[in-house]
């Protein structure tokens, strides 16, 4: 690929749902584009000290009467002598057989990061980076278009993410990095140093919101560029809206993904990767997370 050559414009599917910070509970929101395998929902928050129970419902619609089907009801219960978690499905107003986990993995008074990862056949849940449970779908995932959060829970952020598209079979175990709002480390422009350079297997994740009025042309692009005047550049247009960027370093190069879809690869020798010592982010973007 020649320097500066552009990739195709991005399809609409690259527009990702923005995170929601500090929603008031009960909270019900549409899931843009509905759920499909490879999507993740991240919930950051805390369990109040006096919590009895809370519910995270992945619903098929949001009507009040009749009550919508709930494909997945995730319900930690703290008020019984043996706290536990129930998952279930509400179909045509009737609860199905409960699936029960005798251990909550969440504690009253403690903060948490829960990730719901949607696969082809089941949902996997991790709590604070540890696998917690999986629940086989009883209704088609494609029917789910609404997220509802109810009960005794304090939510600091809800994020809508796509799984790493470069992982074979999409069976990657959920990994979530918290979203921060107005953190000094995420003020743009910012710079992150890699004293050892990049190495194969390293994944760099940048999540943020591309602001509607870019200050200059540079903010409309994501660039992966080798150093030096004859450096190779790979770039992809960013839609104004929301983006999650993932750079994957591999033996022989860099791969770039936007919101869960691969958009290009650049061949780079190991020596060049090792020379990449800095990640700079500038332009009209509000950052929520930079992780490497
Ligand atoms: C019921 C409860 C519902 C729901 C359901 C799950 O006992 O009233 O809110 O949690 O269990 O099976």
Image (tube, rainbow, N blue to C red):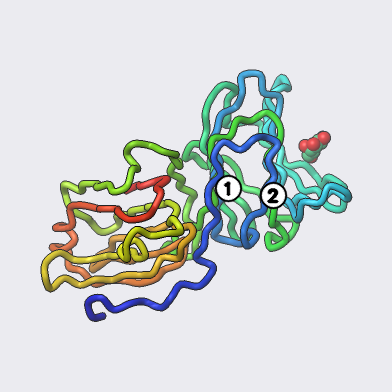
Q: Please give the name of the residue rendered at 51% of the width and 54% of the height, measured from the top-left corner.
A: 161
In the foreground, 117 or 148 = 148
Query: Split into 4 quadrants, where in the image is the N terminus?
Result: bottom left
For ligand 1, give the image quadrant.
top right
| Residue 208 position (above or below residue 113) | below
Q: Quadrant of residue 156?
A: top right
- Image location of residue 133, percent across then percent down: 60, 43
- Residue 58, label in figure: 2
Q: Please give the name of the residue rendered at 52% of the width and 58% of the height, measured from the top-left corner.
A: 16
Q: Please give the name of the residue rendered at 55% of the width and 55% of the height, measured from the top-left corner.
A: 17
Q: Quadrant of residue 227?
A: bottom left
- Binning the other alpha carbons within 10 Å of mark 1 as few (below 14), some (14 to 19) or many (20 upward) gives many
Q: Earlier in the sequence, mark 1 or mark 2?
A: 2
- Binning the other alpha carbons within 10 Å of mark 2 as few (below 14), some (14 to 19) or many (20 upward) gives many
Which residue in the protein does label 1 denote?
116
Q: CA distance from mark 1 to mark 2?
A: 10 Å
Closer mark to the observer between disc 1 and disc 2: 2
């Amino acid at each position: 690929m020649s320097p500066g050559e552009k990739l195709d414009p991005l399809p609409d599917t690259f527009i990702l749902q923005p995170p929601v910070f500090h929603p008031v509970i009960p909270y019900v929101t549409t899931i843009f584009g509905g759920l499909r395998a490879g999507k993740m929902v991240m919930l950051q928050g805390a369990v109040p000290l006096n919590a009895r129970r809370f519910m995270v419902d992945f619903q098929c619609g949001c009507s009040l009467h009749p009550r919508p089907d709930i494909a997945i009801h995730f319900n930690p219960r703290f008020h019984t002598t043996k706290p536990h978690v129930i998952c279930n499905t509400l179909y045509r107003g009737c609860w199905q057989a409960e699936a029960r986990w005798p251990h909550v993995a969440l504690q009253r008074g403690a903060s948490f990061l829960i990730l719901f990862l949607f696969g082809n056949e089941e949902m996997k849940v991790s709590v604070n980076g540890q696998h917690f449970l999986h629940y086989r779908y009883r209704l088609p995932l494609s029917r789910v278009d609404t997220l509802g959060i109810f009960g005794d829970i304090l939510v600091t952020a809800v994020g809508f993410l796509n799984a790493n598209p470069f992982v074979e079979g999409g069976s990657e175990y959920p990994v979530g990095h918290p979203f921060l709002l107005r953190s000094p480390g995420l003020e743009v422009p910012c710079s992150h140093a890699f004293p050892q350079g990049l190495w194969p297997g390293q994944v760099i994740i940048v999540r943020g919101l591309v602001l509607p009025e870019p200050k200059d042309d540079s903010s409309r692009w994501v660039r992966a560029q080798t150093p030096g005047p004859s450096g190779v550049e790979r770039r992809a247009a960013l839609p104004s809206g929301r983006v999650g960027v993932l750079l994957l370093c591999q033996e022989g190069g860099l791969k770039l993904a936007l919101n869960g879809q691969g958009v290009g690869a650049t061949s780079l020798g190991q020596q060049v990767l090792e020379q990449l010592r800095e990640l700079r982010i500038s332009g009209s973007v509000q950052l929520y997370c930079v992780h490497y």
